[in-house]
């Protein structure tokens, strides 16, 4: 294709001959589709109930996907066509009826499309109209289609638009019937067919992304009249850029064969003398551009293909990258999948490099990396986000991404901040720390509170438990419970006696459920917690029980723990007898093993072993902080 760059006289002659040859070989995409319907007689009284009807398309140039050779086409799994049928009274019996591909013969020589109608079509003659792909919206006979701004280089997945020339035929019948309908489909878009000439791929590796920018809008929402295949289209929400994320990356073509990437664009008006096409190329590790391609006097008409020779002309640049690896794993179970979610107001615009046999799924906000079946992601395995522009990493610096880890039994999430200066390192390494199955350091405790935990002359009875949601501990509950902002919680047991009769009013706390465990899974876990003890009286000691429950209610202190793991254990006090500072300091660590499912809650219950006395009282406290839960293998 002619470019705006000056060339020597000999090169101009070669270029002129090449251009003449390209224009002489522009391919018309006007196409004929042989479509069949039933010739079997259908009773005038229409059969009630659903009926499946079909037609056949068997002309090669009507197929919807361009193959790797850049010339031949093929039907795709999932292709769907919209069909209209208007009777002699000018009423639409079928309107935007979806027909789905049912069967493709070997070699893609023909394909069958079927649809189930609420009832058989009345016998008679109809005028048929058709369109591909299914329109996004229809108003009367005006149908609107999307010309994608991101395509796969094969004009597949509905990137092309075709409208049928109106045709008259009988009512549609079953697939087994002989054809009575022929449709001529016309392509409404222009196709640019890009290739790299032999010896000109200076990137040194296949091109996986091509960005094309032109002076006129080439993608957007195209509207046309489905009853007039030759009608001009209108374009709304237009963009002058099309990006190709190549399903099949291309390298330089050779004498043995060409490699093509194709883009469907909105037909153009004639370009002016200074108009140019700009092309950017990206491989897995590098980026470069092509000299501006002169468009003077050119018109890109509907139903045609234009070959475009792309020769990288600028020095290749290394693409900026973030490299992710697992540094620590606190979950206790190996990771099978990792999902990276972009910050608010940012969508991912990058490509992904993964180890051999790994796979990934790509979305605007979420990218999921999966280890091969039967394997896990280890500390030596890393994956990379390769950005197209340095500015895309710069905007991430200081922002937080969400990282979700999936193992065989659990799904856990953590937040990771992209460090300042990440754009100046290439690659910038992001170390991932897989979180615990459950972790609570009470940093989310939004305000201090005391609920029947402070020492008074009299505080008898078993008070109702309370939910701790208002204090930032969602789905936690407790009875005789207190907390200090950002620090920890304490559970209290109240002792009162008189006439040699004693009463012990125990306290209790129950955590939120272990929701990170997958539904239907039960796993062995190890629960670590830091603790201390204090008491308001010299006599006796604080005692506690620990375990789990699946009870979803808020539970009073006189309720036994459903699954006790640590039986009543006495602990010496750590603080002064007056407990004046309420320091919430925890000085010891203990642990217990349990089997938990997603409904399991961690439970602690607090009492005292103080004996009977005459006319006395006292408070006994257990302080808890830094709860960590790991899966045990």
Image (cartoon, helix red, strand yellow):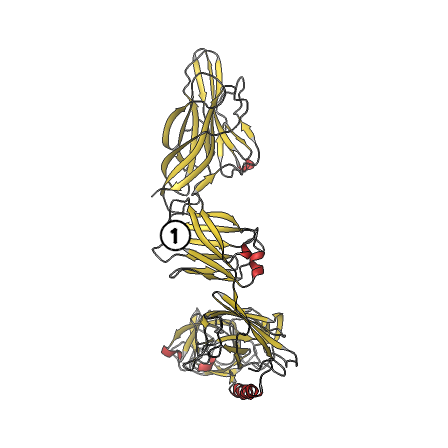
Side of 448 relative to 39 (left or right)? right
Q: Is residue 421 left or right of residue 543?
A: right
- Quadrant including the N terminus: bottom right
Q: Residue at x 43, y 56 (%)?
A: 382
Nearest the viewer among 270 and 231 is: 270
- Residue 140 appearing in the image: no
Compared to residue 615, the image places residue 399 above or below, namely below
Considering only vertical position in the picture, is 494 above or below 100? above
Q: Position of residue 171 (x, y in %)?
A: 47, 79
**Residue 11 drawn at (x, y percent):** 55, 86
> Which quadrant: the C terminus?
top left
Confirm whether residue 391 shows in the render: yes
Question: Is residue 579 rendered to the left or right of residue 68?
Answer: right
Which sits in the foreground, 568 or 183? 568
Total count of labels: 1
Q: Residues within 10 Å of mark 1 (few under 14, many from 20)?
A: some
- The percent coordinates of residue 139 (x first, y second) are 60, 71
Of 174 and 446, which appears nearest the observer? 446
Residue 629 percent location from the top left of the image: 41, 40
Residue wearing tag 1: 378
Q: In terms of secondary structure, where does tag 1 sit?
A: loop
Closest to the observer: 170 or 248? 248
């Amino acid at each position: 294709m002619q470019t705006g760059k000056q060339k020597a006289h000999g090169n101009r002659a070669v270029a002129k001959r090449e251009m003449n040859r390209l224009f002489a070989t522009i391919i018309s995409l006007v196409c004929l589709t042989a479509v069949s319907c039933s010739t079997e007689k259908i009773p005038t009284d229409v059969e009630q109930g659903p009926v499946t009807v079909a037609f056949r398309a068997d002309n090669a140039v009507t197929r919807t996907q361009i193959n790797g050779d850049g010339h031949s086409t093929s039907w795709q799994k999932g292709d769907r066509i919209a069909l209209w049928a208007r009777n002699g009274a000018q009423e639409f019996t079928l309107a935007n009826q979806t027909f789905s591909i049912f069967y493709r013969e070997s070699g893609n020589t023909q394909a069958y499309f079927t649809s189930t109608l609420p009832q058989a079509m009345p016998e008679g003659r109809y005028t048929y109209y058709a369109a591909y792909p299914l329109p996004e919206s229809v108003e009367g006979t005006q149908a609107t289609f999307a010309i994608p701004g991101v395509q796969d280089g094969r004009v597949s997945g509905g990137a092309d638009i075709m409208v049928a020339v109106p045709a008259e035929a009988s009512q549609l019948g079953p697939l087994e019937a002989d054809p009575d309908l022929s449709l001529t489909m016309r392509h409404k878009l222009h196709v640019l067919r890009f290739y790299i000439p032999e010896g000109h791929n200076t990137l040194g590796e296949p091109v996986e992304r091509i960005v094309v920018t032109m002076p006129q809008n080439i993608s957007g929402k195209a509207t046309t009249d489905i009853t007039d295949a030759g009608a001009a289209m209108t374009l709304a929400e237009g963009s002058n850029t099309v990006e190709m994320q190549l399903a099949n990356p291309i390298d330089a073509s050779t004498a043995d064969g060409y490699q093509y990437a194709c883009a469907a664009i909105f037909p153009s008006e004639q370009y002016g003398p200074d108009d140019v096409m700009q092309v950017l190329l990206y491989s897995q590790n590098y980026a470069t551009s092509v000299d501006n391609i002169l468009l003077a006097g050119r018109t890109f008409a509907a139903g045609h293909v234009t070959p475009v020779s792309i020769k990288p002309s600028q020095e290749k640049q290394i693409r900026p990258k973030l490299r992710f690896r697992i540094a620590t794993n606190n979950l206790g179970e190996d990771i099978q999948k990792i999902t990276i979610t972009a910050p608010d107001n940012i969508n991912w615009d990058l490509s992904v490099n993964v180890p051999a046999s790994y796979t990934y799924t790509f979305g605007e906000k979420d990218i999921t990396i999966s280890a091969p079946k039967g394997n896990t992601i280890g500390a030596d395995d890393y994956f990379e986000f390769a950005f197209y522009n340095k500015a895309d990493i710069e905007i991430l610096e200081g922002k937080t991404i969400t990282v979700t880890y999936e193992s065989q039994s659990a799904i856990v999430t953590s937040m990771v901040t992209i460090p300042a200066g990440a754009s100046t390192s290439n690659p910038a390494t992001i170390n991932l720390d897989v979180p615990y199955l459950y972790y609570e350091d009470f940093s989310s405790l939004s305000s201090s509170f005391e609920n029947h935990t402070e020492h008074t002359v009299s505080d008898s009875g078993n008070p109702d438990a309370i939910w701790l949601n208002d204090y930032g501990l969602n789905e936690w509950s407790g009875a005789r419970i207190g907390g200090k902002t950002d620090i920890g919680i304490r559970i209290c047991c109240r002792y009162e006696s008189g006439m040699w009769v004693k009463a012990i009013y125990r306290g209790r706390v129950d955590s939120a459920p272990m929701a990170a465990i997958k539904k239907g899974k039960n796993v062995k876990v190890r629960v670590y917690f830091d603790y201390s003890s204090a008491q308001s009286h010299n006599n006796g000691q604080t005692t506690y029980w620990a375990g789990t429950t699946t009870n979803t209610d808020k539970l009073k202190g006189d309720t036994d723990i459903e699954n006790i793991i640590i039986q009543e254990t006495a602990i010496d006090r750590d603080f002064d007898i007056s407990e004046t500072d309420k320091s919430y300091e925890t000085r010891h660590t203990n642990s217990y093993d349990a089997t938990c499912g997603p409904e399991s809650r961690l439970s602690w219950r607090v009492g005292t072993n103080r004996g009977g006395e005459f006319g006395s009282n006292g408070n006994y406290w257990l302080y808890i902080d830094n709860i960590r839960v790991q899966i045990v293998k």
